[in-house]
Image (spheres, rainbow, N blue to C red):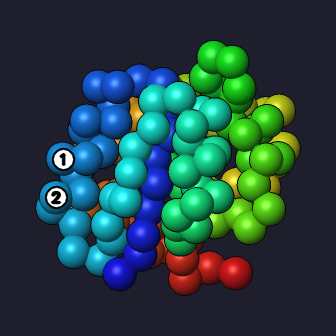
Amino acid sequence: MYNCVAIDDDKLFLGLLDAYFEEIDSAKLMAVFDNPVKGALGVVQMEPDVLLLDYQMPYLDGFEMLTMIRRKPKVVIISGHLEKPEDLSFPADRFVSKRDLKEPHQLEEIISEVMESD
């Protein structure tokens, strides 16, 4: 089972992710954070396998937050953008538009794919 942490300033979306994980057998949502600073601390403490991360957040964006983490998990950017922005140049294992993530099995497949890739 893969351990996951989600960081997003959209509390409604974090609630949706929590509901999706109730339907997923191969991964567990350890924690959600709507504050990127607290989220970075949580990732350092929990050392998840996968980080589900919004990269546009107030105070500290996803890019800046990742620089605070020494042991980086696999990173899945989940964004409100429809397409991967051209300037997305940090090491993310996958980009997913929130609008395309409609069912729990899609999230489960994404997590499995990033964990199986190298």
Give percent across and percent down for residue 95: 59, 48
Residue at 25% from the left image edge and 47% from the top image edge: 18
**Mark 2: secondary structure:** helix
* Image quadrant containing the C terminus: bottom right
- Return the residue at label 2: 22
Camera-nearest residue between 81 and 62: 62
Residue at 71% from the left image edge and 26% from the top image edge: 60
Identify whether 113 is placed above or below 75.
Answer: below
For residue 37, side relative to residue 48 (left or right)? right
Marks counted in the figure total 2
Camera-nearest residue between 32 and 114: 32
Give percent across and percent down for residue 7: 50, 40
Question: Can you tell which mark lies on residue 19?
Answer: 1
Give percent across and percent down for residue 85: 71, 32
Q: Is residue 4 visible?
A: yes
Residue at 58% from the left image edge and 55% from the top image edge: 43
At label 1, counting other C-alpha atoms closer than 10 Å, the crowd grade (few under 14, some 14-19, many 20 or more) is few
Residue at 46% from the left image edge and 30% from the top image edge: 34
For residue 76, side relative to residue 92 (left or right)? left
| Amino acid on which disc 1 is placed | Ala
Identify whether 57 is placed above or below 98.
Answer: above
Give percent across and percent down for residue 59: 69, 18
* Image quadrant containing the N terminus: bottom left
Camera-nearest residue between 52 and 114: 52
| Amino acid on which disc 2 is placed | Glu
Cα gap from disc 1 to disc 2, whole angstroms: 5 Å
Q: Are marks 1 and 2 in contact (CB under 8 Å)?
A: yes
Q: Is residue 93 visible?
A: no
**Mark 1: secondary structure:** helix
